[in-house]
């Protein structure tokens, strides 16, 4: 009678033991994940723009018109048009109201990827291109390409 022992295990108890072992291991891994410090690389620069006022020009009837964009590090603050002579306002009556509308939209949505209204598609696109050129000058990255603004 000495050497042989018979162990009887019920399947239900074996399954319970395996389930509790898996749950215990999952809780242990979760605790390790939550409490071990992680090092995340810092972004080089989170600034989108170099703060300031940047301009580009469009030509209306041989007269240059400046489109100015005021930016902070992360936002477009204002878009304006200056040097619009009285003669250009008469010859191009849509330029000023279109610029006012686009200015509000650009500041609100923080992008120049807007679709100009069907009422003024060409004027709107020329002004959006001029604003984009000014924003390219304001970009925080040192590598950018500046193209000439459209001419009417």
Image (spheres, rainbow, N blue to C red):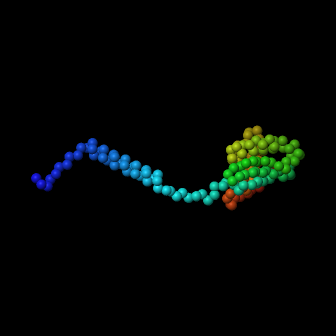
Residue 105, can we see it?
yes
Q: Is residue 94 above or below residue 46?
A: above
Q: Extreme left residue here?
A: 1
Residue 121, can we see it?
no
Q: Position of residue 59 (x, y in %)?
A: 82, 51
Q: Extreme right residue here?
A: 87
The residue shown at (82%, 49%) is 82
Q: Extreme bottom residue here?
A: 142
Q: Position of residue 33 (x, y in %)?
A: 45, 53
Residue 94 lies left or right of residue 38; in this view the side is right
Q: Is residue 148 above or below residue 9?
A: below
Front-most of residues 136 and 93: 136
Q: Is residue 136 above or below residue 14?
A: below
Front-most of residues 61 and 139: 139
How many marks on residues? Answer: 0
Residue 30 lies left or right of residue 118; in this view the side is left
The residue shown at (74%, 39%) is 118
Q: Extreme front residue here?
A: 35
Q: Position of residue 99 (x, y in %)?
A: 78, 44
Q: Position of residue 110 (x, y in %)?
A: 69, 47
The residue shown at (63%, 55%) is 46
Front-most of residues 121 and 11: 11
The residue shown at (86%, 44%) is 89
């Amino acid at each position: 009678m000495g050497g042989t022992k018979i162990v009887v295990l019920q399947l239900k108890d074996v399954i319970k033991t395996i389930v509790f072992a898996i749950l215990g291991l999952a809780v242990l891994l979760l605790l390790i994940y939550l409490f071990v410090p992680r090092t995340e690389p810092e972004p080089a620069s989170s600034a989108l723009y170099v703060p300031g006022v940047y301009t580009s020009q469009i030509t209306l009837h041989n007269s240059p018109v400046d489109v100015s964009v005021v930016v902070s590090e992360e936002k477009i603050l204002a878009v304006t048009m200056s040097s619009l002579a009285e003669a250009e306002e008469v010859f191009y009556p849509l330029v000023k109201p279109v610029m006012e509308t686009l200015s509000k939209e650009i500041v609100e949505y923080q992008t120049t990827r807007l679709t100009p209204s069907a009422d003024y598609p060409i004027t709107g696109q020329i002004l959006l291109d001029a604003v984009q050129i000014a924003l390219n000058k304001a970009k925080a990255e040192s590598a950018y390409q500046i193209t000439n603004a459209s001419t009417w």
